[in-house]
Image (tube, coloured by chain):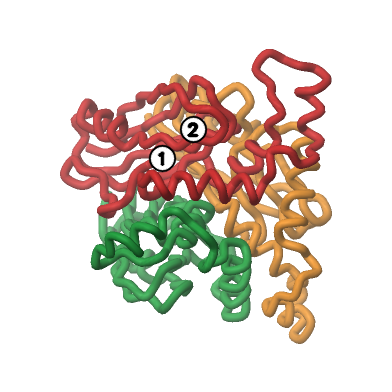
Chain colours: A green, B red, C orange
Amino acid sequence: MALSSVELDTGAGISLHDVTPNIKAAVARSGIKNGFVTVTSQHTTTGIAINENEERLIEDVKGFLTRLIPPKGRYLHNDIALRDCPEDERENAHSHLAAMLLGSSEVIALADGELVLGQYQAVMLYELDGPRRRKVSVQVCGE
Amino acid sequence: MALSSVELDTGAGISLHDVTPNIKAAVARSGIKNGFVTVTSQHTTTGIAINENEERLIEDVKGFLTRLIPPKGRYLHNDIALRDCPEDERENAHSHLAAMLLGSSEVIALADGELVLGQYQAVMLYELDGPRRRKVSVQVCGE
Amino acid sequence: MALSSVELDTGAGISLHDVTPNIKAAVARSGIKNGFVTVTSQHTTTGIAINENEERLIEDVKGFLTRLIPPKGRYLHNDIALRDCPEDERENAHSHLAAMLLGSSEVIALADGELVLGQYQAVMLYELDGPRRRKVSVQVCGE
């Protein structure tokens, strides 16, 4: 078992970040050949999902999530940002709701030292309230 | 490896339940220090997601899911409840659809006996068709 | 640890496929009695979710996803299909977006050789851009 974390700086608002190379590096460092990898975001306004890393699709994701959960909607959670103003709090209820739909973890099998992923699959961190410094935990399990 | 389950009684309609303390207790009981924990709901009208346990956000979640998937919409699945009336069946197609979006499991890394979670992260059971008695399985893996 | 894969041919557009029997067969073949199973789709236009395998609910899923993410909407990603026309590329941005919401993996605990699932729970592959030949990886872990 080998635990590590990926740290990265994200873009403004919604941005997608392909962490597949970081996961592959963690697998290589671990020396583990067969098993699986768990990938979990450590934040409540990010998501982890496996999808295609394609720039036009990324724009579609941003448009879709913005229409589905309008940032300027009326959300009770945003009163915290308005009233209490802790340093790291923003009007980000929409980001929490999107994170809820995307999920915070995925598990990928590992065979002969390679992630068992299809041709177009990339493990993506979805920043939903950037820019921020983010951390994703990567646990490689097996032998 | 140590398998246990969390049982809890949920609220009416949509309600959110923070099971992080239960998971931490399962980890402590297991004696396992490094590895990961899998958390899986055992129901088709609940979801498991990691988010902030904040009361206004929880109200936002209820409002958002109700607008996204109106309980009073026209769903074919609800004919079962109307026609066959099994004891535990309700008009709950909207609950199944929400469960599909939320997902039924998450995986969290474990380091030095602590869940690798960010400051605001809580593992939440989303009841989507309460009140009911619910079960969540918690598998602690590692050494 | 025992890794295998489920291969299946899916239906047109959106179709749901219950892979629970395949997973149970993989568990039986592995001889592993206690642990967990990871299930991960190997495609970017499919999802994995646990839900009830009920035919009217499946129709509700198709209707809901089609309304939520209209296939005929304007998506930038679809320009690839129109312009470059690789053999396996279709106008499928809506399928990628649905896959993002559904997620690509689930983890299920295993006790005494049985999946720890509730009465109505089935592990479903959601085809979102069929028909296609699809692969799902199943990793059985434990002892």
Q: Nearer the viewer, residue C24 or B18?
A: B18
Up the image or down, A89 lies above or below B13; here it is below
Picture residue at 64% right of the left edge, 63% below the top: C97
Mark 1 lies on residue: B124
Which corner quadrant holds the N terminus of chain B?
A: top left
Instruction: Classify mark 1: residues with Cα within 10 Å, few (<14), some (14-19) or many (20+).
Output: many
Mark 2 lies on residue: B41
Of labels 2 and 1, the one closer to you: 1
Q: Earlier in the sequence, mark 2 or mark 1?
A: 2
Residue A22 in view of the camera: yes
Q: Amino acid at mark 2?
A: Ser
Which corner quadrant holds the C terminus of chain B?
A: top left
Residue C142 falls in image quadrant = top left
Q: Nearer the viewer, residue B73 or B140?
A: B73
Picture residue at 62% right of the left edge, 62% below the top: A68
Residue A142 in view of the camera: no
Residue A58 falls in image quadrant = bottom right
Q: Horizontal placement of C38 versus A60: left or right?
A: left
Chain containing the residue with disc 2 = B
User: What label does residue A100 carry, if any?
Assistant: none
x, y (%) of residue C9? 76, 50
Picture residue at 76% right of the left edge, 78% below the top: C81
* Residue most extreme to the top: B87
Chain containing the residue with disc 1 = B
> Do the residues bearing badges 2 and 1 touch, measured as CB atoms within 8 Å?
no
Instruction: Classify mark 2: residues with Cα within 10 Å, few (<14), some (14-19) or many (20+).
Output: many
Please, what secondary structure does the residue beneath circle 1 have? strand
Up the image or down, C117 lies above or below C18; here it is above
Q: CA distance from mark 2 to mark 1?
A: 10 Å
x, y (%) of residue B41? 49, 32
x, y (%) of residue A65? 58, 66
Q: Horizontal placement of C21 versus B38: left or right?
A: right
